[in-house]
Amino acid sequence: METDLVTNSRVGVLRRVRAATGRASDGVAARVGWDGIAREYRRRGTLEREGVLALLEDRLRDYDARVFRVVGEDVGQSVAERLVERGVRRMVVPVGLPAAWMSASAAVEYVVDEGLSSEELDGVDGVMTGATLAIAETGTFVLQGVAGQGRRAATLVPDYHLCVVRAEDVVETVPEAMGRLQGTAGLATTFVSGPSATADIEMTRIKGVHGPQFLDVLLIV
Amino acid sequence: MSGAGLDPKTAPTFPMAAKAMMGDVQLRKNVRHATDVIQEKRARVVSEMPDWQELREAGKQIRRHTMEHLDFYLEEFEANCTRAGGVVHWARDAEEARRIVIGLVKASGSDEVIKIKSMTTEEIQLNSALEAAGIHPYETDLAELIIQLGADRPSHIVVPALHKNREQIREIFQREMNLPELGGRPEDLADAARMFLREKFLRVKTAVSGANFLIAETGGVCVVESEGNGRMCLTLPETLITIAGIDKVLPRFQDLEVMLQLLPRSATGERMNPYNSIWTGVDGASAGDGLRDGARDGLRDGPRVFHVVLMDNARTEILADDEGRQTLNCIRCGACQNVCPVYRQTGGHAYGSVYAGPIGAILTPQLQEMHHAQSLPYASSLCGACYEVCPVKINIPEVLIHLRNKVVKQNTAGVAGLFDVEAGAMKAMALIFRSERRFRAAQRLGRIAERPLVRRDAQGEGWIGWLPGLLGGWTQARDLGEMPKETFRDWWERRGENGN
Ligand code: SF4
């Protein structure tokens, strides 16, 4: 009985769609139609390398994130400085985060997230991750469910997020980013542009409503 | 707890409600301020984009293409979502959608749900249905929380509480969260909401969300938000129930490159809003990411049970209408609301529907299959500003005129061509207006004749929703204000006689 209803709704909706469009569509026609969509917008950026990085920094700062450039071997040192500035003692890190990024400091305890509960995540001061890529034009970095970036919950519950981005993973435009993400489109993917924010109260921008309030980005050049 | 939903079936007609709203000076001030701020931000970030018009054109073509092949993309989405561990349900109408969601919540074993702002759940008045079923919904978007705690109704599709200012919000929070000492800075209010909701995020095991986009190619779902409340609902609970209109489909993952440029800039005037979440099925991680199985275990993330409800609710009626169809291209950015002179004067509630402004004026009557909300296609000056800002180039004025014709046709039972009542009424009016004697006689006659027809609204203003005979065409689509007790001429003459 219940199954009947379920199938009926499915069949019913699809039948109504087909009646409305006047035919049943098929994959071939859809493909041809999709290929014919005019896409005359910019696919590639025009800036040279340094310009792209500068744009990313500018856009991230515009969204109240702090940005620091570091060279590869100094990441650990820079991380240590950030954690002192932010007063962070306990830091969650995802499985697979490069060990060299975790500064050897007695003042900070690193907790590897192997499935921490929400309450446990709520009890730490911050989280550090890498990123799949960053988009300069919008001041965005993209996190996915892979080693070094970890679970969505881990970058959400703690109040501070430190994200490490490699310069070679920075693209200028959104289409360039989507092109790179196509291969792993099935992964849980989060676009982050600045700390959590709301403008629901008289359009005043307020940081850190439910997600992290503080965001630092280290750019490895 | 939550306010009565906006139901076009029972809402007063637009002119009647608008008149009442025009008297609310505070509301108009709040709406004007908020829409001014968003418009200014929008204009700035749109002008940064040299290819904005090309993006709009692509957006329009993607949406139009999707509608042409909607059955194919819906089935493709269903297959891919199912393969990734999601469960897809179909709902023909609001009633069925509510029944499915309530059943799923009950099956999850929870009598509470956390909710992400979703106009689709507002459209089907899900909250009151949940409560009637003994399930308590918590809205988690700050604006929706303000609305829910204040037993209010949304007035804008992107910023639903923009009609409230900070003092009004503070009063609501003080009372409903029991915080007599609460400060009045926006930060204080946001902190209060954070405290109030965090406990719920960590405790409640079932969530209900809407969707901005469903991606047919991957079976993925995309939600765009700012506060992180969306991510909380999508990530922490054990069961996630997503409800989406069948119009939310996008053919391919790549199409997001267009939508994710158009939507945030149009909606909130941001280059990208703080968070976009895309998830596919239930796992979070996937095979083929080059990880050992052991490493992947630590990445399992998000709900263990994921449902998507694909809802029609009159969308196929709109799809079947060649001229009305473009309404389905809407990506709910709200830009047309912010720019609309009518919306800016009346606020959202006057539209008697969760979809306010120009998009509401075309969407609501069609969702109601033109049987309710017939005054909405007239709630526009046809200035064209909405068309200009629409990121997917919906020609709203064109659809408005199309719907006006439909209203007239429907109300004249399809014989409008032979005997157009409205045109007849206009001719009679023209005759009357041409002669002063006839005009005065008509006024006197009108005041006597209208008496039994006048309804009083909450403000004591009189409105006429039905006129007999030839004049009937006029009131089929709009309400008429009652005639003044005394005409200006009568008053002038009396004033002259009395010498004051
Ligand atoms: S009609 Fe266009 S401008 Fe209005 S909400 Fe929809 S997409 Fe935005």
Image (cartoon, coloured by chain):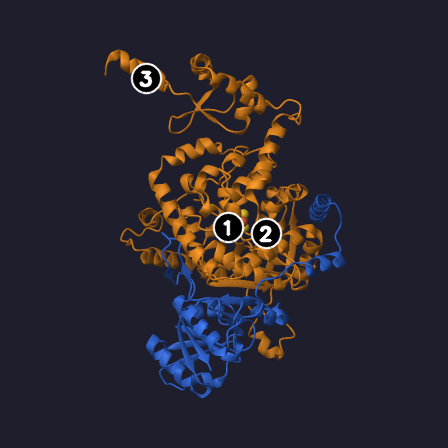
Chain colours: A blue, B orange
Crowding at mark 1 (Cα within 10 Å: few <14, some 14-19, many 20+): many
User: Is residue B204 something that shows in the picture?
Assistant: no
Q: Earlier in the sequence, mark 2 or mark 3?
A: 2
Q: Mark 3 = which residue?
A: B491
Q: Earlier in the sequence, mark 3 or mark 1?
A: 1
The quadrant holding residue B420 is: top right
Q: Amino acid at mark 3?
A: Trp
| Residue at 69 percent of width and 50 percent of height | B68
Q: Amino acid at mark 2?
A: Ala
Q: CA distance from mark 1 to mark 2?
A: 25 Å
From the Cβ of disc 1, is ligand 1 less than 8 Å away? yes
Report the disc number at residue B103.
Answer: none
Q: Amino acid at mark 1?
A: Val
* Place of residue A62 in the rendered image (x, y in percent of width and height, measured from the top left): 40, 66
* Place of residue A70 in the rendered image (x, y in percent of width and height, measured from the top left): 42, 83
Crowding at mark 2 (Cα within 10 Å: few <14, some 14-19, many 20+): many
* Place of residue B174 in the rendered image (x, y in percent of width and height, measured from the top left): 32, 49
Report the disc number at residue B244.
Answer: 2
The quadrant holding residue B416 is: top right
Q: Are marks 1 and 2 in contact (CB under 8 Å)?
A: no
Q: Chain of mark 2?
A: B
Q: Are marks 3 and 1 in contact (CB under 8 Å)?
A: no
Q: Are marks 2 and 3 in contact (CB under 8 Å)?
A: no
| Residue at 68 percent of width and 57 percent of height | B78
**Secondary structure under badge 2?**
strand
Q: Mark 1 = which residue?
A: B389
